[in-house]
Image (tube, helix red, strand yellow):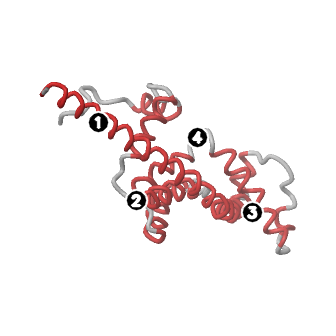
Amino acid sequence: MILKRREKESLPSKLRNLLWPKMGWGRTLRYYKHRTIRISDSTHSIAAGLAIGCAVSWSPAFGTHLIQAAFFCWIFRGNFIASFIGTAFGNPWTFPFLFYIGYHVGKAVFWLFGFGDYFEDMPGPVAMEDMLDKPLKMLFPMIVGGYICAAVTSPVFYYIFYNMIKGARLARKLRIQRKAHKVAKEVTGQKK
C-alpha cells in the first residue's frame, strides 16, 4: 500500500495522538476543515452531517455515537462522512462538560415532571463509588438531558456550519478562477 506506515503505530502513541495530535491542534483542525469542504455533496447535506455529529456527542452512550450519527443522517439527509467528522466534537476534553450540562438539564426535566425526589440524595459531585452503586441515577438524567441539549444545539451548529462551508466553498471557487485567469493570461502573453 502506498500511504501505509512502515512501522505500525503503538497503542500508547495512538492514545497520545488522540489527546494531543503530533502535528498540533491547529494543523489538525485545518486538515479536517479542508477535508470537509472538499466533500462532493451539497452545502446543506454537509452542514446537516456536521451538526448531527456534534449533536450525538451529547449522548453518554459512547459506543453508539457513529451508529446514531449514521441513523440521523439517514433521516435528515445529512452526509455520513461529515457526521463522522462532527462526532469529534465529543472528545476527552469536552465530554466532562457535555455530560455535566446534560445531567443537570435532565435532572431539571425530571424535577419539572415530578420525579425529582429520585435524585434528591445526589446534591453535588458524585464519587466513582456512588456512580457504580447508582448508575441509573446518573444515566437517566444524562440521556434525557443530552438529547434535549442535542435538539437545542443542532440548529445552531447547522447555521454556523452552513455559513462556514458556503463561504469557504465560495472562496475556493474564486481562488481557482483567479488561478485559471492568471494561467490564461500567461498563455495568451506567450503566444503573442
Image disc number at residue 97: none
Q: Check disc 4 and report the residue beneath it.
A: 92
Image disc number at residue 106: 3
Residue depicted at x 85% and y 74%: 114
Q: Amino acid at mark 1?
A: His
Q: How many residues crowd around disc 4 within 10 Å: few (fewer than 14), some, or many (20 or more)?
A: few
* CA distance separating discs 2 and 4: 31 Å
Q: Earlier in the sequence, mark 2 or mark 4?
A: 2
> Can you say whether 59 is above or below 181 in the image?
below
Q: Are marks 1 and 2 in contact (CB under 8 Å)?
A: no
Q: Report the label total.
A: 4
Q: Earlier in the sequence, mark 4 or mark 3?
A: 4
Q: How many residues crowd around disc 1 within 10 Å: few (fewer than 14), some, or many (20 or more)?
A: few
Q: How many residues crowd around disc 3 within 10 Å: few (fewer than 14), some, or many (20 or more)?
A: many
Q: Check disc 2 and report the residue beneath it.
A: 42
Q: Amino acid at mark 4?
A: Pro
Q: Earlier in the sequence, mark 3 or mark 1?
A: 3
Residue depicted at x 27% and y 37%: 180
Select label 2 or label 3 by which is in front.
2
